[in-house]
Image (cartoon, rainbow, N blue to C red):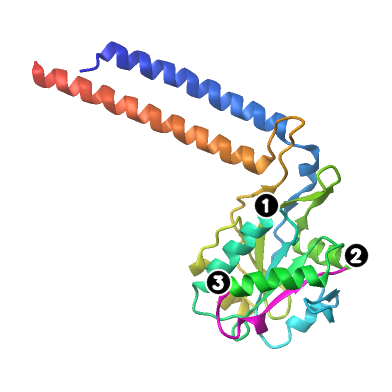
Amino acid sequence: MVSSFTLRRSFAVIAVMAAAGLAGSAQTLTLAKPEILNKVGIVQKLNDQLPLDAAFLDETGKAVRLGDYFRDSKPVVLALVYYKCPMLCNLELDGMFASLKRISLRPGADYRVIALSFAPEETPELAAAKRETYLKKFNQPDAAAGIHFLTGKAPEIQRVTEAAGFHYAYDKRPDQFAHASAIMVVTPHGRLARYFYGIHYNERDLRLGLVEASEEKIGSPADEIILFCFHYDPTTGRYGLAIMNVLRAGGALTTIALLLGVFLLFRKDRAGKRDAA
């Protein structure tokens, strides 16, 4: 049986390591946060109006207005992404379509999906290819009629992103956008009804959001769990903020598990000694 002295010493060593590790993680996180991320975030603008006259191109290259998708009393799920994103946008779209696939409502019949690229250089051809990828994944009859991937020019894009409270920034060095992740549910009249953060969306909440939005009801502010899309910088050996948050959380959970394990062993050792006495 492990001695209580050994257990206490192990517990103390791990506690010191935990404190040092968490402090180091916090310091690394502070040092690693790039200045550009101060420009990035999402402000919930519940009940604010989207600019329905904003002009875009759909996946076929046809000129459309945002309001073209708000004409028949159906709510809209809006995803602000860019199609060449190497990280978070694909995860966001994956999570959105996975959740929508699991609910009883159907795109086209009950709601619409709009993915809007905030990268003005992206083309309808790129939007069409990305849309085709997700139509195959979604794999539901008649879904194509309710799923739209748009591109546009910078002034029109910015009208929508500003109205939605979606703030992003372009980083020249890696030729990427720094941005956060969230999808929005919009009422049939174009008012922002719900925000869903992250890359995994509870299908029950998403369905409820769509049902309420279809009745022009505005939801409550969502808890902000922000994921940032940012690159790994090989010149500094630092990760972007989203990755650092994951690493920090993983380290903290590992430390807690170790502490709990040693504590349980210590209690078991003491209980064994009492029984022996």
Q: For this rendering, which residue is in front, 217 or 28?
A: 28
Contact flag, marks 1 and 3 (Cβ < 8 Å): no
The mark nearer the N terminus, 1 or 2, is 1
Describe the element under mark 1 as helix, strand or loop: loop
Residue 221 locus on image (x, y percent): 62, 60
* Marked residue nearer the N-terminal end (2 or 3): 3
Residue found farthest to the bottom? 72
**Given this view, does label 1 or label 2 mark the residue nearer the observer?**
1
Q: Mark 2: give few (<14), some (14-19) or many (20+) Cα within 10 Å.
A: few
Q: Which residue is mark 3?
A: 100
Relative to 215, say whether 229 is above or below.
Answer: above
* Image position of 14 with respect to 71: above or below: above
Dot 3, crowdedness within 10 Å: few (<14), some or many (≥20)?
Answer: many
Q: Is residue 247 above or below residue 272?
A: below
Percent position of residue 267, x then y: 25, 24
Q: Which residue is mark 1?
A: 87
Q: Magenta segment, which residues?
A: 138-152
Q: Is residue 47 visible?
A: no
Quarter of the rendering containing residue 149: bottom right
Q: Could you tell me how far apart the alpha carbons at marks 1 and 3 are, in whole angstroms?
A: 21 Å
User: Which quadrant would residue 218 be assigned to in this image?
Assistant: bottom right
Along the line of sight, the residue nearer the viewer: 277 or 219: 277
Q: Earlier in the sequence, mark 1 or mark 3?
A: 1
Give the amino acid type for the residue marked by disc 1 in the picture.
Answer: Met
Residue shown at 60% from the left, 58% from the top? 222
The location of residue 215, given as percent across then percent down, is 61, 81
* Residue receiving disc 2: 155
Above or below, comparing residue 168 to residue 128 in the picture = above
Please identify, in this view, whether the residue under mark 2 or under mark 3 is nearer the observer.
3
What is the quadrant of the N terminus in the image? top left
Give the alpha-carbon distance from disc 2 to disc 3, as whole Å.
30 Å
